[in-house]
Each structure stands twice: as C-alpha cells, then as structure tokens.
Amino acid sequence: MQEMIFRGVMPPVLTIVDEQGRLNRQGMANLLDKLVASAVDGLVILGSAGEFANAPKELRLEAAEFILDHVKGRKPVYVGVAAPGTADVIEYALHAQTHGASGLLIVNPYYARMSEDAIVNHYKLIAEKTNLPIMLYNFPAVSGQDLSPELVKRIALAVPSVIGVKDTVDCISHIREMIECVKSVRPDFRVIAGYDEYLFSALMLDGDGCIPATANFAPEITCGIWRAYHEGNYDLAIELHQKLCRILPVYRYSTPLHSAVKEAVLLTGTDISTAVLAPCIATSADGIAAIKRILQENDII
C-alpha cells in the first residue's frame, strides 16, 4: 500500500458549502461518492480548490472530519493542513491523523518570507509531531516563495517522512528539474504535477501523477491518461491529453477557479451547492453558459 501513497490521479476535492458558508453535508457526500466510484487514486481535501484559505478554522476541522468519516478508507484521503505558522499546521495535522488521514499536504509558510533554514525547520517540527507521510505543496504564485529543486532535495534528505512534492509551477522545466534533482538522492520521492495539462509531460519525465481540478467533474480524462500511459497506449494518452486541454478554459470563468469548477460539477450531474466562501463570488450566468458549451462540445455532458 505504501508504494501507492501520493501516486496517480488525485483530485483536489471541492469543499461544498451553503450560501451561509456552512458545510453542505449532503452535497459534500454526493461529490465524495462520485469520486470514490471513479478511477481516481486518492482524494486531496482542503487544498487550494478546497478553499482552505477562505475557510474559518471550525469549517476546516468539520470538513476534514466529515470527509474522512464518509470516505471510510474507500480511497486514500490526503488533508491539506496549510497555515502560516507551524503551531497551527501541527494542530490541523494531528486532527487529520486522529480521524484517519492517509497523508498531509503542506504549503510552505506564507506571508512572511522565510530563510531556507526556517523552511526546513518548519517541516522538521511538523514531522516530529505526526507519523503521517507529508507532501510539500509548492505554489509560489500564491505563497510568494518557490521551493526550488535544491531546497526540496534538502528537505527530503532532512525529513524522511516528506515523501513528495506537488509542484504547481506553470513551467514544465521546473517539474523536470525537480525530478532530476530530488529523485537522484531519494528515488522513492514523488513529484506530482499541480497543473492538469502537465500530467502527460510529467509522466514522460518519470513523474508520479497529478492533482487536477478537472477530475472533480471529468475524472475519466486524467484517469484515462494515467492508465493509457502505463499500458503503453500512447495514441490514446495523447488523444485524452488534447481533450483535457480543450476543457481547461472552464477555469477562466471564475477567479479563483472554485466557482467555475463547482458549476461544472453540477452540470455533469452531481447534485451540489455551488456556493463559494467570501471573498470569492459566483460565476456569472454568461460564464455558466460558456462552461456548459465547453462540456457539451467535448462530450462531457
């Protein structure tokens, strides 16, 4: 089982809330059941697409507990436990561990820029308090600080329970350098693409999977790329990769993408609330119509 941890296609699961910002348990269960029944290899919760940054602490804890209890081990569940301060991360991590998480996804400290020594110490302190495997989450566009391949290598050597990185950098060479640099000293280390369209390229470079938001509403595409690649059916993998790229414009219709992806989930037949947490706002009627056209033109609905 350990060899499958943080590997494959793992959607960043949306957090389903009502118009008052409370957890919508029925909608959350509907989405979870759809994903569990699909071919995805695990579920990543309370990451960027899970709106952790806009969620109050109570909602984060409630959502983590509800999701872990509902999934009940049917798929691995990896819990995002990001916070600017180490003490808060440890609190979220211990809560996730208590409720049966398979692993943790942890953004490097944000707002205040940290020295590399401080970042390494951050992960050391967290690892001392939990026995769960940890995946670094590198998203410099929002965290303000890149986890360079050399720094990730340093963390990987210093903290054995850090077993991978989600590399959300809009540059395939960053993923390539991450693979070359870190796997040279930790062959077991996972390098996961953060952007959907880099899944196929990452696999060709010896990467380990992807955390694609499109898998919330069209998991058959990225799961199909994964399966076709590993079966050596590269023509099918390329065909599905091209289809994936044609549906990515869905993301354009809300910034950040949470609302647009929720509308796509609803349009593809999963009964959820499409409410988002403030300060995010709902997708416009024109945007919803455009998302529907994209899905129809690509035979998603």
Image (cartoon, grey):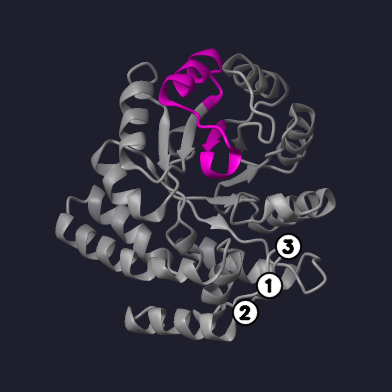
- Would you name the residue on which mark 2 appears? 271
Characterize the local packing of mark 3: few (<14), some (14-19) or many (20 or more) Cα atoms within 10 angstroms.
few
Q: Is residue 187 visible?
A: no
**10 Å crowding of disc 1: few (<14), some (14-19), many (20+):** some
Q: Amino acid at mark 2?
A: Asp
Q: Which mark is residue 27?
A: 1
Do the numbered discs 2 and 1 sit on residues whose CB atoms are within 8 Å?
yes
Residue 173, horizontal then vertical, whole percent: 30, 36
Q: Which mark is residue 157?
A: none
Where, by quadrant of the figure, is residue 94 drawn?
Answer: top right
Give the quarter of the image for residue 208: top left
Identify the secondary structure beneath mark 1.
helix
Q: Is residue 164 left or right of residue 229?
A: right
- Sooner in the amino-acid sequence: mark 1 or mark 3: 1
Specify the amino acid type for callout 3.
Answer: Pro
User: Separation of disc 1 and disc 3 at Cα?
Assistant: 21 Å
Q: Report how far apart the C-alphas of labels 2 and 3 lie in the structure.
A: 24 Å
Query: Which residue bears the numbered disc 3?
Result: 279
Instruction: Say if 236 sits above or below 95 in the image.
Output: below
Q: Residue at x 27, y 46 (%)?
A: 201
> What whole-number distance in Å separates the C-alpha atoms at marks 2 and 1?
6 Å
Span highlighted in magenta in the image: 134-162
